[in-house]
Structure formats: structure tokens, C-alpha cells
Image (tube, helix red, strand yellow):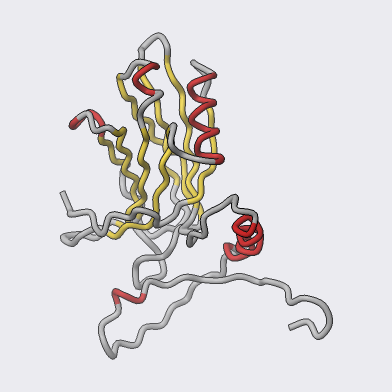
Amino acid sequence: MDRLGRNEFIGEVRVALKKLKEGENKRYNMGLERIAQNKETNNQLVEQGALVAEEERGRILVSLCYNIEKGCLQVGIIRCAHLAAMDSNGYSDPFVKIILQPDMGKKSKYKTSVKKKTLNPEFNEEFSYEVTLDQLAKKTLEISVWDYDLGMSNDFIGGVELGINATGQRLRHWFECLKNKGKKVEYWHTLTQQGAPSSDKPD
């Protein structure tokens, strides 16, 4: 606490309490993260009408590249940072799902591998969609991050949509991919719970 001037933000931690049983005591040993530092900036943007107030669930680094020779969109799921903790051990077992909408059947859905006990997973996985550039301009790429639970429904951590109907940086990323054919364009995106599916059933 600063007696004079403003208090300095140290850090915060998020714990998913829904997995605790009634009356259960659980001790957590977790490191503080500096996520909330962005909230003041976000609030200023909200007041300016530039951002919808959303709880931040972490961030994801995505690369997009339209390969002219192969006639396909290449999507790279590189890594996530500061994901929300969904398990009682203070971590998550994250994996990422991507769907190109409107749905093209099985060819439109992909999943990364699951990374155990981490809030900062490294994926470095690439997926491709055979689609013409004209068709791609009308589509939306839905990216969602999940916490894997063995034998149970997986928990939704957060998601982001890229496409012509997106706004801000999400729209900019999409446009840069369409404009710079053959070039890999990487952007960090904030994950939110907007339009969250309630669960993901185990395969």
C-alpha cells in the first residue's frame, strides 16, 4: 500500500472453484501473474467504445498464411500464455480446437495435442484447409482453448474468432493474411468467454 499516490499492482491468480466438493478444503501453491495490469487500459478502451468488456482468459499466438501454390489456408497454433487455471492443482491441461465456418464437415475441424499441467503451453502445430481465396474471404475461423478432463466433459477456457465479421486486431490479422498471400502473419489474440460453448464431450 502506498500512503501517497496510487497503489502498485503486484499480481493476481485465478482458481476454478467449481471443481471443489462442498466442504472440501484445498491448499493452492500458485505463482501470481500480472494479467490484471491490463484491466485499467481495457476500461479506458471500453469508455471510448473501442472494446467490449470481457474477462480475459489468457492469450494465444496464431499464424495465418494463404498458400497460393497449394490453394490452402495454413493455420499455426503456436503457443498460449497466462491461461485461466481450470484444475484444482492450479493448472490446466490445455488443447486447442479450430473450426473453419461455415462448417465443411470433418475437413473443417482440427485439434492440437494436449499439454499437461501448464498455463503457458507450447504447441507449434500447423493445420491446413483446402479453400479458394474467394471462399476464404467469406469464412470465419473459430479458435477455442479447452482444458482436457479424462472421461468427463472438457472445460472451455476461452476463444477467439478471426474473419470478415471480426473487429480490431482480429479483423486486421485476417485482412493481412488475405492481402499478403504466401506470407506467414503472426498475431497474439486475447481469449474471451464470449459465445462460449458449455462443454466439449470427450472423444
Specify the quadrant of the image occupied by residue 172: top right
Q: How many marks?
A: 0
Residue 164 image point, x, y percent = 44, 32
Q: Locate the N terminus by quadrant.
A: bottom right
- Is 178 left or right of 92, judged from the image as shown? right
Residue furthest right in the image: 4
Picture quadrant where residue 141 is located: top left
The residue positioned 31% from the left and 24% from the top of the image is 129
Looking at this view, is 150 or 146 the one in front? 146
Residue 159: where, in percent of width, then height?
A: 39, 49
Residue 173: x, y in percent? 52, 33
Give the side of residue 48 with respect to residue 127, left or right: right
As displayed, is residue 81 above or below residue 182? below
Kindly give the residue lying farthest to the bottom in the view shown: 23
Residue at coordinates 74% horizontally, 77% vertically from top-left?
7
- Residue sitting farthest toward the top: 69
Q: Residue at x 45, y 52 (%)?
A: 191
Specify whether 9 is left or right of 117.
right
What residue sits 34% from the left and 25% below the top? Answer: 128
Task: Look at the picture and state if 79 lies above or below 157.
Answer: above
Residue 119 position, x and y percent, is 45, 58
Foreground pick, 122 / 166: 166
